[in-house]
C-alpha cells in the first residue's frame, strides 16, 4: 500500500485503553441469536448461498475493468441519493450512530455491554445451527466488551444481527472492524454484509467481507430472496490470522462513478490492501463456478448492515470470532485512534 493509503480519516476509537490480553472471564449472554434449523450439508451444496466449491485462491492483481472502483483511496464522501427505502420506524435512533463514534457515520464500540439498540435477529439465513452471537466481556480490542460469535461448530452455523442505516446513506461505504479469530475456516463464511437499493427495483444486492480457504474473500451477491445467486467471488491469499487482532477495512462502491455497474469490493488488512486473484461466478446450478463476471447493477443507497458469522458449509473445528470497534462511513475510517 502506498504512503497515501496509510493516511486514515477519522476513527471512532473512543480513547479507551487498548488491550490484547487473554480472556477476562465471560459475562452473561445478552441478546444472543436464537438457534434454528440446521443448514444443508456439503461443500458443494446448491442450497446454500455463497456455496462455492473450495479452490486455490490466487494472490494476483486486483480486478480491472467494470469492477474497479473509480474512487481514490482518500475516499471522497458521498452526499447520498434520494429514493432509498425508508428506515424502519421501529429502530431506535441510537442504532443509526451507535456509541463511541468519532468521525464515522455509524459506529459501535459495544461498551454498553449489550446488544446495540435497533439490532434484530434475521429470519432464515443468519439464524440457524450451533453457536450464538452476543455482546460480552470475554475479549475486547479496547475497553471492556465486544461482539462475540461463540462456539460455532457443526453444519452451517449462522448467527448474525441486522441493523438499518440512516436514510439516504448513499451508494459508497467505507468500513472498519477489529477482528480476533480462534481458528480460520476452510469453507465460505461471511462476517460483515451491507445491502444496497437499486433504482426502480425492490431488490437489495449486497457486499460482504468473507472467509474461505483460511483467507479473506470479497463478495457481491444478487438479492436474497430469492436465492442470493449469482454470486461474484474474489479470493485472496491474505490469511485470516488466529490468536491476535487484525484491523479489517473495506470499500464498497455501488455507485462506481461513470461506470455502468457496481464496483468490485476492496479489502485492507492491517493497512495493506488485499490483492484478489481472478474472480469466480457461482450460480448454484451444479456447474458451481465460471470466470464470467455477472452483471452487478449500480446501487442507489446502502440501507442495512448484517454483522455476525454466517457459515454456508460445515465448520472444520469449533471457532469463536470477536469483533470490536465496528464503523461505517462515507470516507475512510482507518485503523488508528
Image (tube, rainbow, N blue to C red):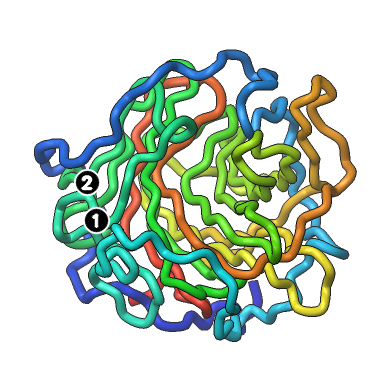
Q: In the rendered image of this protein, does residue 139 appear above or below residue 63?
A: above
| Labels 1 and 2 touching (C-beta < 8 A) | yes
SS for callout 1: loop
- Location of residue 181 in the rendering, given as x and y in whole percent from the top left corner: 39, 40
Q: Return the residue nearer the eye: 203 or 182.
A: 203
| 72 sits to left or right of 250 | right
Residue that appears at 28% across and 48% down: 147
| 322 sits to left or right of 40 | left
Among numbered discs 1 and 2, the one appearing first in the sequence: 1
- Location of residue 186 in the rendering, given as x and y in whole percent from the top left corner: 57, 28
- Location of residue 328 in the rendering, given as x and y in whole percent from the top left corner: 44, 68
Q: Return the residue nearer the eye: 152 or 30.
A: 30
Depth check, mark 1 against mark 2: the one in front is 1
Q: Return the residue nearer the eye: 319 or 206.
A: 206
Name which quarter of the figure residue 170 lies in.
bottom right
Name the residue that disc number 2 marks: 135
SS for callout 2: strand
Q: Is residue 181 visible?
A: no
Q: Find the distance from the CA under tag 1 to the CA under tag 2.
A: 9 Å
Q: How crowded is mark 1: few (under 14 residues within 10 Å), some or many (20 or more)?
A: many
- Location of residue 337 in the rendering, given as x and y in whole percent from the top left corner: 33, 77
Name the residue that disc number 1 marks: 116
Q: Can residue 126 be seen in this view?
A: yes
| 294 sits to left or right of 203 | right
Name which quarter of the figure residue 257 lies in.
bottom right
**Placement of the N terminus among the 4 image quadrants:** bottom right
Amino acid at each position: 500500500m502506498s504512503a497515501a493509503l496509510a493516511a486514515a480519516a477519522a476513527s471512532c476509537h473512543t480513547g479507551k485503553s487498548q488491550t490484547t490480553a487473554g480472556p477476562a472471564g465471560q459475562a452473561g449472554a445478552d441478546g444472543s441469536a436464537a438457534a434454528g434449523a440446521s443448514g444443508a450439508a456439503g461443500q458443494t451444496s446448491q442450497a446454500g448461498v455463497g456455496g462455492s466449491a473450495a479452490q486455490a485462491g490466487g494472490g494476483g492483481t486486483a480486478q480491472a475493468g467494470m469492477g474497479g472502483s473509480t474512487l481514490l483511496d482518500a475516499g471522497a464522501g458521498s452526499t447520498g441519493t434520494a429514493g432509498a427505502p425508508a428506515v424502519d420506524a421501529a429502530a431506535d435512533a441510537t442504532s443509526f450512530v451507535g456509541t463511541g463514534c468519532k468521525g464515522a457515520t455509524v459506529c459501535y464500540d459495544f461498551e454498553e455491554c449489550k446488544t446495540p439498540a435497533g439490532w434484530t435477529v434475521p429470519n432464515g439465513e443468519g439464524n440457524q445451527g450451533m453457536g450464538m452471537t452476543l455482546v460480552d466481556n470475554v475479549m475486547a480490542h479496547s475497553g471492556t466488551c465486544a461482539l462475540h460469535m461463540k462456539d460455532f461448530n457443526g453444519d452451517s452455523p449462522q448467527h448474525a444481527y441486522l441493523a438499518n442505516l440512516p436514510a439516504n446513506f448513499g451508494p459508497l461505504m467505507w468500513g472498519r472492524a477489529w477482528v480476533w479469530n480462534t481458528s480460520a475456516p476452510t469453507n465460505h463464511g461471511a462476517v460483515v454484509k451491507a445491502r444496497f437499493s437499486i433504482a426502480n427495483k425492490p431488490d437489495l444486492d449486497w457486499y460482504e467481507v468473507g472467509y474461505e480457504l483460511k483467507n479473506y474473500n470479497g463478495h457481491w451477491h444478487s438479492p436474497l430472496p430469492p436465492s442470493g445467486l449469482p454470486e461474484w467471488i474474489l479470493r485472496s491469499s491474505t490469511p485470516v490470522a488466529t490468536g491476535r487482532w487484525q484491523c479489517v477495512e473495506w470499500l464498497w462502491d455501488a455507485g462506481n462513478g461513470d461506470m455502468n455497474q457496481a464496483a468490485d469490493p476492496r479489502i485492507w488488512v492491517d493497512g495493506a490492501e488485499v490483492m484478489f486473484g481472478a474472480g469466480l461466478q457461482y450460480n448454484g446450478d451444479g456447474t458451481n463456478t465460471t470466470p464470467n463476471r455477472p452483471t452487478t447493477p449500480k446501487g442507489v443507497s446502502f440501507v442495512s448492515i448484517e454483522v455476525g458469522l454466517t457459515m454456508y458449509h460445515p465448520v472444520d473445528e469449533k471457532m469463536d470470532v470477536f469483533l470490536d470497534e465496528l464503523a461505517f462511513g462515507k470516507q475512510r475510517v482507518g485503523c488508528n485512534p
